[in-house]
Amino acid sequence: MIFHELNNSICKTYLIACEATGHALLVDPVATRIDRYLAVLAYHHLKLDYLLDTHTHADHRSACGELSSLTGAKVVRHLSAPQPNVDIHVQDGDLLEVGNLSLKILYTPGHTPDSVSVLAGDRVLSGDCLLIGGTGRTDFASGDAGQQYESITRTLFSLPDDTLVFPGHDYRGNKRSTIGHEKRHNPRIANKTREEYIEIMAALGLPLPEQIQEVLQVNATDLEDSEITYPSIAELNKVFQMSPEMVRDQISGNAPPLIIDVRQADEFNGELGHLAGSVSIPLNRLAAKMTEYEAYKDRKIITVCRAGVRSTTAAAILNALHFTDVHNLKGGMIEWVRSGYPVQWIE
């Protein structure tokens, strides 16, 4: 196996390749380093098969989309990832075959709902879930400290103690650790109860990453920031989230709401289908298109997307446009389908 960290910075990008066949995977590529990645691939005569983000990043732009366009490599993300342009959705336990290498996906949510780790032989790429002497923050992007505790203690800490740990970030100059070392010495989680860990994470008080709006929401939507004015975190947090059950009850009521699906047109009739009676208005066209819906300024509107991320952005945009009764389908079409509720496709 060929294995390199390519950035030599606090943000880590890992190259995994099969030495025998020359097939390769890049994990967490950064948009500002694309030329470097292409040069390394060319130098080693490698064919890039896959591009994988371990989660939706908030501190740097992902290079997956551009590298996919340049190389033809397939973009891989967890099933719950909000991004529209994904070639392969993976779940816990799925295998990625890279030449003669078999890499295992471990679902490790908590930092974000779509966080995964990658088990590659004697090492695990832990993304922003487990760091060296720390853990990924859980205070935005639908993070969940309790869920992260379970991901680390039940999934990652179940690996052999000598498993090498390569995190998505490191701020102290560390290159790697081991599962055994983190079990015994990680100050945030070693010998901590779930409740203690949640308290620790709640008290961190970390500043938000710089340019978070220009990074997190662009990564989640695959739309360039010039195409849309993104709401602030405070505006996103004001959006009322409705469970699939609540949305189902609203749809079947006497005064059904306007359902606006903000996914791309091909997603609207894609694998997850869409809600009956919903209107397809892609996110980047939403503000302009809503001039046709002035009659709904004070009527109930429910926004929908794949995972509830783009549609939360849409709901905040509608609030800013003075639509007064806007709600979001929490978890999007993924949770709607998981709940067993009906969907439609256009014939």
Image (cartoon, rainbow, N blue to C red):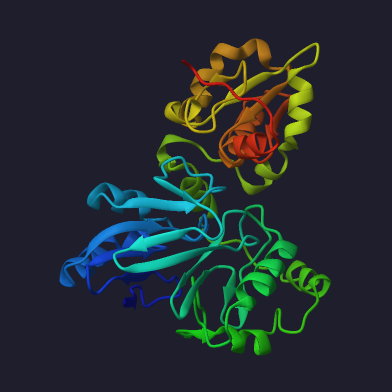
Where is residue 300? Give x, y as percent. Answer: 73, 20
Q: Quadrant of the N terminus?
A: bottom left
Expressed as whole percent of the image width and height from the top left, the position of residue 127 reads: 52, 68
Q: Nearer the viewer, residue 138 or 294?
A: 138
Left or right: 338, with 279 as reference point: right
Q: Residue at x 47, y 26 (%)?
A: 285
Image-quadrant location for residue 92: bottom right
Query: Foreground: 312 or 330?
Result: 330
At x 69% / y 84%, what residue is drawn?
A: 187
Query: Is there any visible trace of residue 205 in the rendered image?
Result: no
Image coordinates for residue 121, horizontal then vertical, percent: 43, 77
Residue 233 % position (x, y): 64, 48
Residue 296 located left or right of residue 42: right
- At horizontal 71% and vertical 18% (from top left) the residue drawn is 257
Image check: 69 left or right of 256? Answer: left
Q: Residue at image x 64%, y 21%?
A: 259
